[in-house]
Amino acid sequence: MFFISDVHHGLASIKNIPDTKEPVVILGDLINWIDYRTGQGIAEDVFGKEIVIKLVQLRKDHNFKDRRKLWSSMFEENPDLIQEKLELAIYRQYKEVFNALKKFEVWIIPGNVDSVDIIKETMSSNVNYVDGKVLEYKNLKIGFAGGGVPTPINARGEISEESFSLKLNKLGHVDIICTHAPPFVSELITDVITNKEEQGWSSLKDYILEKEPRFSIFGDVHQPQASRWRLGRTECMNVGYFRANSNYLELTSLLQ
């Protein structure tokens, strides 16, 4: 079994996943709105490079107020046409990602940029949508709780802390807890490029300290201050940013 996160339409990176017939677990963020390194993505395709440069800088500055204003202004002239272009680009990216994954057995949960409805509409028969489920694999109970932490951006895949906590705690005790975002631990949520705290789940931190799973696996923060951290008895691991580094975590490496 291989764990990856933050695919962000990284079709070239998908080619590097070993073809061993083991499940590939994707912890959210399949599509690419903006690659903050290059500007590439849906936003650039629809709005152009100049707008994306501004969006990137405002995001790095955590200036969410002006970012929302800029985003809203881009819909003023012809909102229906803009929305149609965005939806077409979103559908295209999902279809291309799922096509690239066709030879794998895939388990998936949504991230903050994901649209659950479009995932379910476009995913192929080899994909198992496991959000909110507990599955057994090689005598291990693996729990899944997807969704993005709420932010001022209000991305499609964001859910409230209350909704996430309810979903998480319904899972009960598991050996491995899989989420999109990390527990709220400063070292895990701090991005070393922006030198700012990004986002994490307070309820996941509480769950880990109470339930004590062996492992907590997640992504979301692309350049974390710490990619591994021990929280109580639980080893916490960030397995993203797959689009940029093609990194994956192999289950057998955890159990040796």
Image (cartoon, rainbow, N blue to C red):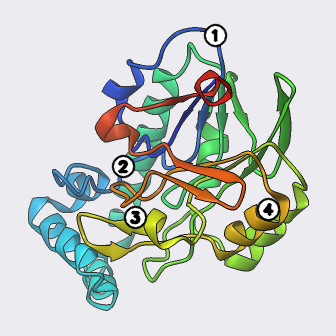
Which of disc 2 and disc 1 is earlier in sequence?
1
Q: Quadrant of the N terminus?
A: top right
Q: Nearer the viewer, residue 252 or 223?
A: 252
Mark 1 — residue?
21
Q: Residue at x 23, y 64 (%)?
A: 193
Pointers 3 and 4 in contact (CB under 8 A)? no
Mark 4: which secondary structure? helix
Judge the density around disc 2: few (<14), some (14-19), many (≥20) Cα neighbours within 10 Å: many
Which badge, 4 or 2, comes first in the chain's sequence? Answer: 2
Badge 1 or badge 4: first in the primary sequence: 1
Q: Is residue 103 left or right of residue 138?
A: left
Q: Nearer the viewer, mark 3 or mark 4?
A: 4
Q: Residue furthest left?
A: 50
- Residue beneath label 3, please? 83
Image coords of residue 172 (percent x, y): 90, 56
- Residues under labels 2 and 3: Cα distance? 16 Å
Going by the numbered disc 2, the residue's amino acid type is: Asn
Residue type, mark 3 in image: Gln
Residue 73 locus on image (x, y percent): 26, 83
Identity of the amino acid at label 1?
Lys
Name the residue rendered at 9%, 66% in the picture.
50
Looking at the picture, does residue 94 appear above or below residue 219? above
Mark 1 and mark 4 in contact? Answer it, CB < 8 Å.
Answer: no
Left or right of 131 on screen, residue 238: left
User: Which numbered mark, 4 or 2, is in the foreground of this view?
Assistant: 4
Q: Does the CB distance between marks 1 and 2 fall below 8 Å?
A: no
Q: Could you say whether the residue bearing mark 3 is in a helix, strand or loop? A: helix
Mark 4 crowd level (few <14, some 14–19, many ≥20, 10 Å Cα): many
